[in-house]
Structure formats: C-alpha cells, structure tokens
Amino acid sequence: MVMNPKQVFLSVLIFGVAGLLLFMYLQVWIEEQHTGRVEKRREQKVTSGWGPVKYLRPVPRIKPQVSHA
C-alpha cells in the first residue's frame, strides 16, 4: 500500500504530537516519583493558577565576577 504525501505528512504530524505529549507526561510523572511530593505540587498548581511551567523557565547560571580595575 502506497501512501500519498498528504497522508504521510498527517501521520508524521499526529505521531509527533502524540510522542511529545507522552514525553511531557512521563517527564512530570518521573519528577513526581523522584521527589515524592505529589500533594504539594497539586496544591501549588491549584493556588498558582496558570503560571509558567517549571521546565520552561530559564536555568539560573553562575555569572563570573569580573573586577573592573
């Protein structure tokens, strides 16, 4: 059976979105298993509303201290 290009594009798009959603779900699930703080996170989500997601925030980096002489 040969698929036309439109069918190939749609199937790749659907599987890509499904894979991305699965990856995000597993990432949150593994994080909760690792920390063991499921109840705290659920309470925090309810009180914070639609705040930014943790993994979308920029990672704080150590800035080298430059002395201006």
Image (cartoon, grey):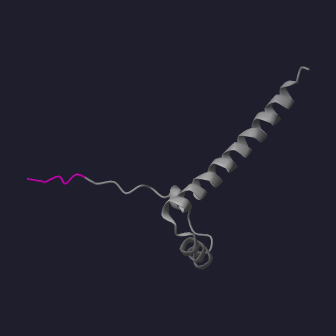
Residue occupying the point 45% across, 56% down: 58
Question: Is the magenta region chiefly helix, strand or loop?
Answer: loop
Res 5 → quadrant = top right
Percent position of residue 38, x then y: 57, 69
In the displayed orientation, state which residue is furthest to the top. Answer: 2
Is residue 15 shown left or right of residue 57? Answer: right
In the displayed orientation, state which residue is furthest to the right. Answer: 1
Res 13 → quadrant = top right
Q: Is residue 43 above or below residue 23?
A: below
Residue occupying the point 73% across, 45% down: 18
Q: Is residue 38 above or below residue 26?
A: below
Res 44 → quadrant = bottom right
Residue 65 highlighted magenta (yes or no):
yes
In the displayed orientation, state which residue is furthest to the left. Answer: 69
Residue occupying the point 62% across, 52% down: 26
Percent position of residue 46, x then y: 62, 77
Residue 18 highlighted magenta (yes or no):
no
Percent position of residue 3, x then y: 88, 24
Q: Nearer the viewer, residue 35 or 45?
A: 35
Percent position of residue 48, x then y: 57, 76
Q: Which residues are magenta?
A: 64-69
